[in-house]
Each structure stands twice: as C-alpha cells, then as structure tokens.
Image (spheres, rainbow, N blue to C red):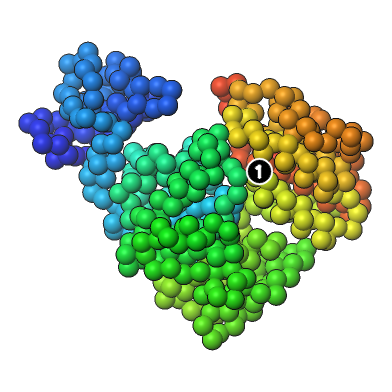
Amino acid sequence: MRKLNEIFNTDHDVEINDVKTNSKEVKEGDLFVCIKGFNVDRHDYVKDAEINGAKALVINRDVDSNLPQIKVSNTNDELVNIVTKFYDYPSKKMNMIGITGTDGKTTTSTIIYQLLNKFEKTGYIGTNGVISDNYNETINNTTPVPEHMHRILNQLYLTGCKNVVLEVASEALAQKRCDQIEFDYSIFTNISPEHLNYHETMEKYLDAKCILFEQTKANGYCIINIDDTSSNKIIEKCNGKIITYGKNMNSDYIISDIKTDENSTSFKLKNKNEIYEIKIPLIGEFNAYNMAASLAVLNNMGYEIKEIQKYFDNLFIPGRFEEIKLGQNYRIIIDFAHTPNAVNNILDYANSVKKNRIISVSGAAGGRWKEKRPIIGKALIQKSDYVIFTYDDPRTEDVNEIINQMLLNVENNKEKYERITDRTEAIKRAIEIAQKDDIILILGRGNETTVPINGELIHQNDLEDVKKVIKGE
C-alpha cells in the first residue's frame, strides 16, 4: 500500500492498494491508470473502475469523475514509472535474466530456472506462468503487462528470490512492457519469420528483439547464438559483455558432436580450454543450443559446468517435446511447435529416428501471421506420412479457412491428410489409426489448457485428451 503523494507530486494523500489498467480487475482502493490500447481507450471505463472501488485516476484527457485525478501527458508512457515506483523497483533487487528469440524461449528459460534454482532461489515468468518454490500464478501473456510484471517481480522478491528468469516476447519489447528493467543477462536464441502481423517486416521484428540487449547492464552479459544469421545485428546493439555460443569455432561456447536418440541428446561443449561431455533428457539438436545458452548463463554467474551436470537428469520442460508413455507400442509426442522453424525441427528429428510412420496432428493460430500457414502445411505433408489438420488457437477465424490456407501448396496430396476441426477428435483419430512403432506428433499447443474461440475460452489440453483415449475414458 502506498499513498498517492508518494508516487506523484500532489496534495492527495489517498492510500492506494494496487495499480490497474483494466477496469474489470479493479478492486477496492486501486489506482486506475487510463491507458490507450490498440482497440480500446481506458478513459471510457472510468465509471466501471469507480463502481469496482477505484480510489484515484491517472488520465491524459478530461473525464467525468469526482475521484482524485492526476493528469499526465501520456498515460501509456507514465504507466511503467508509476508501477516501478509503487512496488519500489523490485527488478533492481534481483538478478534479471531475459531470453528472447522466435523459438527456444520457454525451453531455455525453464532449463535456467530449474538448474539455477538448485543453487539460489529463483523465479520464472513466461509461457508456463509464474513459477517459484513459494509462489505460482497463471498469467495471460508470455511477458506480462507492466502493472502485472512489477507486482509479480515484487512478490517473487518478497518470497526470497535472488534471480528471475523472464521470457521476453518481441511484442512485449515493442510495447515497452520491460521498460525500466535492466537485465544482468540477456539471451538471443534465434530468429525466423513470425509475428509479422504485428511487426510488419522482419527488420522491425529484429529491431524489437534488439531492445533487450540495449537494456542489458554495461557490466552484464549478452549471450548470443552466433550461428544465427541475424546475430551480427544483435551484437551491434549489445550494451553488455558479449558471450557467443554455437557450432562456429569462434564461439565462446562451441557445440560439436551432437547426437540424439529416443530419450536424450548428447554433445560436446568447449569453453576456453575445457571440453565437457553433455547429456540431457531433452530431444533434438535445437536443445543442444538451448542447453549451451543456459550453461553460459550459469557459468558466467560463477557456477562450474561440472558442478551443474549432476542436475541434468531431472530436467523436464512441460509441453515441449513431452513424450507420453502409457504402455502403447507407438510413440506420442506433444510439442508447442507452431512456427515453420520449430515444426521443421521436430519433423526432422522424427524422421531421423522413425521406424514406421509419422502421424502429425496440427493446425495454425487464428489472428496471427497468415503467411506461415502454407509453409507449415507444406512441411507437415512433405515430412509426415499422414497429417490430421485441426484447430490450434482459432480466435475469431474459421477453422476450415485456416486449414484451407495451410493446404494451399499441397493440393495434390489428398491421400496424405484429412481434416477434423475438433482437436480432441483429431487426437482420438490419430491414436485410433496408430500402428506399432509409429510416431504421433501433436503440435502447436504444448501444455496449454484453454482455446480462444469466438471470444470464449474453451478448455482443451492435449495431454488430457491423449490419456483419456488411451485409457478408454
């Protein structure tokens, strides 16, 4: 709780319990900041905020209200200043570790969280919510909006966290959700075409990613996948010390001799004059990269790789290459892959170990970059033996139209696919037709539990559906 005159230069001494920008979230005693979004101006919801208990307003245009009002030139720009001051700058009290990239953010973040938490109390914020030993929360965005971000950071600090691992989405960087956070460690995993419905061009997409590295402390570390073709642009923007990883022999952490099987990935990692034999229970060459980035963080925090290795066996990433073993004589793998790069990676792995057929269940998200749909559809048809097209997160789009766009380049392969718009039924169909030694890939949603369909959130979870079908429920 803070008084209004502790946040602003004002005579109002109203006590404020929290800061909100959504009138539906306002509770008794909150400060309501009237930001302007893409589709809505929160100044229009002042009366709703009052009814829900708001005690003061921050505005940039006149509104009809008797509540104490603080007028600023731009509420959007002022929001971060308000919440950081309200929560007493929690990000400055912990090591902040930010990860950005088209693919690999969640896996890399989770690896760092799970390993670092063995040595110091650590929190995670990202696609899988807020996770720590003492505090957990479900969140709507990979990277929370400022008022949620700093509340969560403060809560993690109050529960004893020394470090926070944060997935940093490009849209969040462009929308200044991470403003006033100075990062001790920043990681660039990779970049490929994605989110262009928002960023419009790859140049703008990359510019947004660069913000993370500009916000890294001068004495911090920017950890860069040097094998990515955009790494030079990222390196130009780095404010901290540059640490590189990749197969490139000029890397600080050199990856070599990658081998994968059904249960693990092994590779060599060379740093300075030391060569480490790494083996992890995560599948695919891409996970060698995720692991190298993670080890670069911990190593530069002062932890010896040999000391960290004893914790590798317990690594687990929910919804990321998660294999379901319920006694069946074929493999079922659930993965979040929803970009062309990620889909190709997992299909390439499946083809490298296949003993019989690959059956893929996949769709594409509605309300997102449409140009990737035929790219993903073509990859699925070319690299699978059979594909069941279904919904992903359709939002307000028609599922059949999304599938039509995925099939633009595969019209002559009708014997290789079918469409079942109900995802639960699509998963059931894949299991029904599975034969010994097949691999079923269920892609696009990972461990998500709700689907946005025409303004409603419908419960659906791939793992739950698989278990019900196999157990005959």
Question: Residue visible at 32% across and 28% down?
Answer: 35
Residue at label 1? 338
Q: Is residue 358 left or right of residue 94?
A: right
| Secondary element at tag 1 | loop
Specify the amino acid type for callout 1.
Answer: His
Q: Quadrant of the C terminus?
A: top right
The percent coordinates of residue 277 (x first, y second) are: 64, 79
Q: Looking at the image, which is closer to me, 453 or 174?
A: 174
Q: Quadrant of the N terminus?
A: top left
The percent coordinates of residue 76 (x first, y second) are: 31, 33
Q: Residues within 10 Å of mark 1 (few under 14, many from 20)?
A: many
Residue found at the very far left of the displayed protein: 11
Q: Is residue 175 left or right of residue 8?
A: right
The percent coordinates of residue 335 (x first, y second) are: 68, 48
Question: Residue visible at 70% across and 68% down?
Answer: 265
Q: Quadrant of residue 176?
A: top left
Residue 32 in sight: yes
The percent coordinates of residue 314 (x first, y second) are: 61, 65
